[in-house]
Amino acid sequence: MSSNASKLHANDAVKGLLAKMLPGAAQSVENDAQRIKQKQKGSKAQLIDRNLKRRIQLQELDVEKLKKRQSRIRRRDLQRQRRSQEEIKELAELEVLERHRKEGKLTKKEAKHLNRLVNVNAERAKSWELDEDEKEDLLELEKYILNKTTSANRIAKSQKRRQKKKSFNDNKQDISPSMARRYPGLTPGLAPVDMSDEEESSEEEGGEEMEN
């Protein structure tokens, strides 16, 4: 308090002295002091205004970041829903193919479709941004498809072998005992090259008489 009182006293003394020696000088000094105060006030106001603008800019930037983040989340959710629908559709198709496989009705077209599903899922794994759970689900789906494809191929080959064996046995049963004796080594299902229709019919008639 004493320091401020001393400053005020000194200022009054200086103003009084100037008023006596230079009329109007005291008023000029006072005006200068007021301008300095106003300038300081203006600087403070500008500083506050700049701070407010900066804060608003930061808030707008945060809002923009929040909007982008929300947009990414919505887009990711849509992708997950679409992938989920596609996987459900593929699983339904696989169930149909599995039923055809068990019934022995799996066609070449369906086998190609299985291969296409495998390739499509492999490409998805490379292109999608997946989290760990999604990667595990996709790998499980690919494993399921591969197992079904391998199983379907094995079943198809096994059915083909059984069909050939059945056809061979059927042809073998068509040979009459007398023909087998007259033409030893005859290939099942085939007649001798030089055998005429009359000979074949007589063999059949002879076979019928023996049965009667």
Image: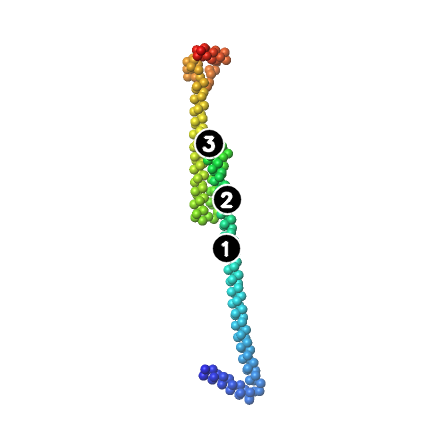
Give the CA separation, mark 2 to mark 1.
24 Å
Residue tagged by mark 1? 69
Crowd class of label 3 (few under 14; some 14 to 19; many from 20; radius 10 Å): few
**Residue 28 lies in quadrant:** bottom right
Residue visible at 43% across and 47% down in the picture = 133
Q: How is the image coloured?
A: rainbow
Residue visible at 53% across and 77% down in the picture = 37
Give the CA separation, mark 3 to mark 2.
27 Å
Crowd class of label 2 (few under 14; some 14 to 19; many from 20; radius 10 Å): few
Q: What element carries label 2?
A: helix
- Decide which of tag 3 and tag 2 comes sooner along the chain: 2
Residue visible at 51% across and 67% down in the picture = 51
Q: Is mark 3 on a helix, strand or loop?
A: loop
Which mark is nearer the camera, 1 or 3? 3
Q: Quadrant of the C terminus?
A: top left
Image coordinates of residue 205 in percent, x first then y, are 47, 11
* Amino acid at dot 2: Gln
Name the disc covering residue 103, or none.
3
Residue tagged by mark 2? 85
Q: Count the numbered circles shown.
A: 3
